Image (cartoon, rainbow, N blue to C red):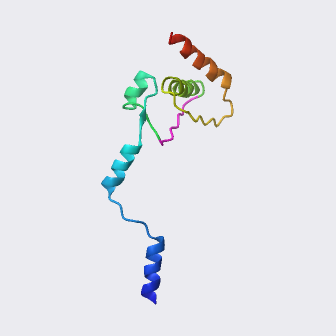
């Protein structure tokens, strides 16, 4: 009976073994590198931001963190035509500011 219980537990609750290389290849194939649209930042990040990752930007007040994040969000939305999820922990997000930034990009495109 003990062996039957063991078999049932293993069959119902254990995971399937997977090779590390298979998991790595799956991750690489399902990830994308999204350029920020800011050349120097993309060089620093070795191409851009990986999908599926969360990025935290921090620094002193007035350092340009919000401006950087809004610029990246606008570049991705406008040039790459991708959805952007912007998490604002200060609750001071301005839709008008984003709209103005997007309108400026559209005007400069000619």
Q: Is residue 63 magenta?
A: no
Question: Which residue shows up at 66% across the image and 34% down it?
Answer: 90
Q: Please tell me whether residue 106 is drawn above or below residue 18 in the rendered image.
A: above
Residue 64 in the image, given as x and y percentages of width and height: 55, 24
Residue 72 in the image, given as x and y percentages of width and height: 51, 27
Which residue occupies the foreground of this view, 74 or 44? Answer: 74
Q: Please tell me whether residue 74 is drawn above or below residue 20 in the rendered image.
A: above
Residue 48 in the image, given as x and y percentages of width and height: 42, 31
Q: Please tell me whether residue 100 is drawn above or below residue 93 in the rendered image.
A: above
Q: Please tell me whether residue 40 is drawn above or below residue 59 in the rendered image.
A: above
Main secondary structure along the magenta-highlighted residues = loop
Question: Which residue shows up at 53% across the image and 23% down it?
Answer: 78
- For this orientation, the residue located farthest to the top is 110
Question: Which residue shows up at 45% across the image and 22% down it?
Answer: 38
Residue 31 sits in quarter? top left
Is 42 on the left or on the right of 97, as rendered? left
Residue 37 sits in quarter? top left
Residue 65 in the image, given as x and y percentages of width and height: 55, 28
Magenta stretch, residue numbers: 52-60
Question: Which residue shows up at 59% across the image and 19% down it?
Answer: 101
Residue 88 sits in quarter? top right
Is 102 on the left or on the right of 45, as rendered? right
- For this orientation, the residue located farthest to the bottom is 1
């Amino acid at each position: 009976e003990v062996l039957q219980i063991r078999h049932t537990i293993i069959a119902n609750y254990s995971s399937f073994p997977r090779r590390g290389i298979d998991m790595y290849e799956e991750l690489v194939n399902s990830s994308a590198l999204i350029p920020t649209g800011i050349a120097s930042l993309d060089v620093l990040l070795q191409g851009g931001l990986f999908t599926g990752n969360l990025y935290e930007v921090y620094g002193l007040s007035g350092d340009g963190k919000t401006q950087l994040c809004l610029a990246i969000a606008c570049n991705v939305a406008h040039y790459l035509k991708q959805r952007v999820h912007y998490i604002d922990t200060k609750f001071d997000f301005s839709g008008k500011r984003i709209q103005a930034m997007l309108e400026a990009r559209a005007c400069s495109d000619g």
